[in-house]
Image (cartoon, rainbow, N blue to C red):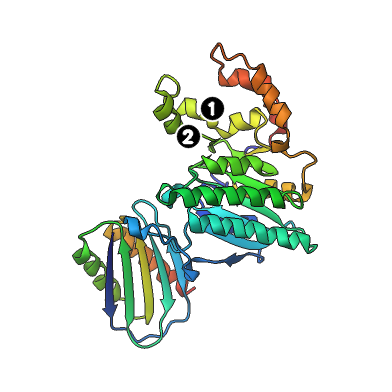
């Protein structure tokens, strides 16, 4: 569904806190460990980097479609939304508390708003450990309630956090979003400009872009950059509950796809859609 | 990375608090809270060294019009003086909503 450009309310233009707020039922949102609690990174100051009072991770408890839910938003503008010790612990704890509530008989979904480059390099191993914990917590929670990843842009979701997205029950993207393990600049740095020209924006979106990810079956919904559409798509996933088959459980499906790919020649993104898609059928888009 | 503190005379009691902005390139985060006792206190952490005089000029201007007994924390990632003043005014607006 296309929305009049003038009258839509952009989701991408919202900051992390506003995004989290916009997904929860009106009047139910309550922030946990907000900026005034000043739980910030102890490591950035030592390296001459200004910390942020919430460490770039907003945790908001409330309801979605009348059901208990927690929304965790990573603030892409702060250190590229990177995961440090504190932001990682906040995300993990939010997922674990949701899991505890589920075990107590209160089904609680989690929505992760991922605008992140992955591990925060200044916190190195602590960031890596945090992402491992996040992934373990997603695996625990997704048995009880849906874990929904939303990447809208403009940062995208890369590195270790793309694995977290991959483990979630549902992935929601916009056309502006990018999702991938290695970002364009990392690929170019490691394998050369012939492999991937990170200055070629059309190429980047053809490979990592939300439309391509959706069309190749690696995402569950593709929506316009519109707050109402994003919120409605999230509501639908919450109501749908735990999927019958989790994407990341389909190991043999993805192994066979890779094995069947003739890598002796260069594939282009449209061919991949035709081979792996979902077909990119317009009617399937929300 | 530099830490700067200022104190200003202030008498008017305020009750609201406000958090605005983000520590992103060219932007800053402002946390404004009511403070017991007289006066206002400002604590700044900035990624750009050597601009103490500029910070003082911006704060002098802000407190020439604002008299709330507050503590203000600023986490700055290289905002221009104009952006700083706008964020401060936004924080006041949010705190008095």
- Tell me which chain the residue with mark 2 is part of: A
Q: Position of residue B28 (x, y in %)?
A: 37, 59
* Residue to which mark 1 is pinned: A207
The image shows residue A51, relative to residue A162, as above or below, that is below
Q: Nearer the viewer, residue B8 or A232?
A: B8
Q: Residue at x 58, y 48 (%)?
A: A132
Badge 2 crowding class, 10 Å Cα cut-off, few under 14, some 14 to 19, many 20 or more, is some
Decide if residue A113 is in sight here: no
User: Which residue matches tag 2?
Assistant: A183
Give the residue at x 32% y 73%. B42
Check residue B8 in the rendering and tell me which mark sits there, or answer none: none
Is residue B91 shown left or right of residue B81? right
* Front residue (pair A53, A92): A92
- For the N terminus of chain A, the image quarter is top right
Residues packed near mark 1 inside 10 Å, few (<14), some (14 to 19) or many (20 plus): many
Eyeballing the image, is A164 above or below A217?
below
Res. B59 image quadrant: bottom left
Q: Which element carries disc 1, helix, strand or loop?
A: helix
Judging from the image, mark 1 belongs to the subunit labelled A
């Amino acid at each position: 569904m296309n929305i009049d450009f003038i009258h839509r309310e952009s989701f991408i233009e919202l900051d992390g806190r506003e995004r989290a707020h916009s997904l929860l039922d009106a009047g139910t949102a309550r922030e946990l460990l907000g900026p005034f609690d000043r739980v910030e990174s102890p490591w950035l100051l030592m390296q001459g980097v200004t910390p942020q009072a919430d460490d770039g991770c907003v945790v908001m408890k409330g309801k979605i479609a009348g059901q208990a839910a927690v929304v965790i938003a990573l603030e892409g503008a702060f250190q590229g939304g990177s995961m440090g010790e504190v932001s990682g612990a906040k995300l993990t704890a939010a997922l674990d508390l949701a899991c505890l509530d589920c075990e107590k008989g209160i089904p609680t979904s989690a929505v992760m708003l991922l605008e992140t480059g992955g591990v925060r390099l200044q916190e190195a191993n602590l960031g890596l450990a945090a992402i491992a914990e996040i992934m373990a917590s997603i695996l625990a929670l997704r048995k009880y309630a849906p874990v929904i990843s939303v990447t809208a842009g403009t940062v995208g979701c890369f590195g270790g956090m793309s694995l977290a997205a991959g483990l979630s029950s549902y992935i929601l993207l916009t056309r502006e979003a990018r999702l991938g393990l290695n970002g364009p600049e990392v690929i170019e740095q490691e394998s050369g400009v012939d492999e991937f020209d990170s200055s070629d924006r059309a190429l980047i979106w053809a490979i990592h872009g939300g439309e391509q990810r959706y069309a190749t079956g690696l995402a569950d919904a593709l929506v316009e950059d519109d707050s109402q559409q994003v919120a409605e798509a999230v509501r639908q996933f919450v109501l749908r509950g735990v999927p019958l088959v989790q994407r990341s459980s389909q190991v043999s499906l993805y192994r066979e796809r890779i094995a069947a790919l003739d890598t002796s020649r260069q594939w282009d993104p449209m061919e991949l859609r035709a081979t792996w898609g979902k077909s990119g059928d317009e009617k399937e888009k929300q | 990375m530099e830490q700067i503190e200022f104190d200003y005379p202030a008498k008017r009691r305020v009750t609201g608090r406000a958090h605005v902005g983000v520590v992103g390139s060219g932007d800053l985060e402002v946390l404004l809270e009511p403070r017991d006792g007289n006066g206002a206190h400002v604590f700044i952490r900035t990624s750009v060294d050597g601009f103490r005089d500029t910070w003082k000029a911006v704060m002098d201007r802000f407190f020439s019009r604002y008299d709330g007994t507050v503590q203000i924390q600023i986490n700055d990632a290289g905002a221009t003086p104009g952006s700083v003043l706008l964020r401060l005014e936004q924080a006041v607006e949010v705190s008095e909503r």
